[in-house]
Image: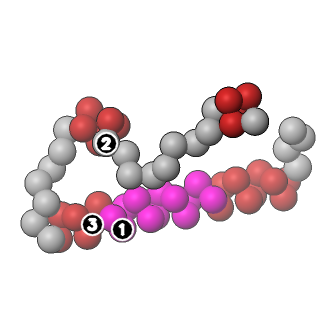
Amino acid sequence: MEWTPEAIKAEIDYRQAALRDDARRVREYYRNGGKPRSWWHRMTHRHEPEVPNGQQAA
């Protein structure tokens, strides 16, 4: 895949939107009385769907 300026901008926009959505979810969680979780819990209990792995997805 060749990275054109448009593709790079689209990737940055996509990632920034995902980070904003994650931050909004975390703020909502704490606002509703949620307790802080360890970094390990956050890494192993993700809410987004799994991304298919290259050839296995084909």
Q: How crowded is mark 2: few (under 14 residues within 10 Å), some or many (20 or more)?
A: few
The three-letter code of the residue at mark 1 reads Arg
**Mark-to-mark CA distance, 2 and 1:** 17 Å
Sequence-earlier tag: 3 or 2: 3
- Residue 30 image position (x, y, % from top left): 18, 64
Q: How crowded is mark 1: few (under 14 residues within 10 Å), some or many (20 or more)?
A: few
**Mark-to-mark CA distance, 3 and 1:** 5 Å
Where does label 3 land, which residue?
27
- Residue 14 image position (x, y, % from top left): 63, 59
Q: Judge whether 42 appears above or below 28 on screen.
A: above
Sequence-earlier tag: 2 or 1: 1
Residue at x-position 68% and y-position 30%: 56
Q: Is residue 41 left or right of residue 8?
A: left
Residue at x-position 66% and y-position 55%: 12
Give the label on residue 38, or none: none
Q: Nearer the viewer, residue 58 or 40?
A: 58
Q: In the image, is residue 38 part of the stretch drawn in magenta?
A: no
Q: Is residue 44 left or right of residue 19?
A: left
What secondary structure is found at the residue carrying circle 2? loop
Q: Which colour scheme is used?
A: secondary structure
**Mark-to-mark CA distance, 3 and 2:** 17 Å
Where does label 2 land, which residue?
45
The three-letter code of the residue at mark 2 reads His
- Asked if the residue under mark 1 is in contact with the one under mark 3, i.e. CB atoms within 8 Å, the reply is yes
Residue at x-position 37% and y-position 61%: 23
Q: Which of marks 3 and 2 is in front?
A: 2
Q: Give the range drawn in magenta.
A: 14-25
Q: Is residue 48 left or right of residue 10?
A: left
Q: Quadrant of the C terminus?
A: top right
Give the label on residue 24, or none: 1
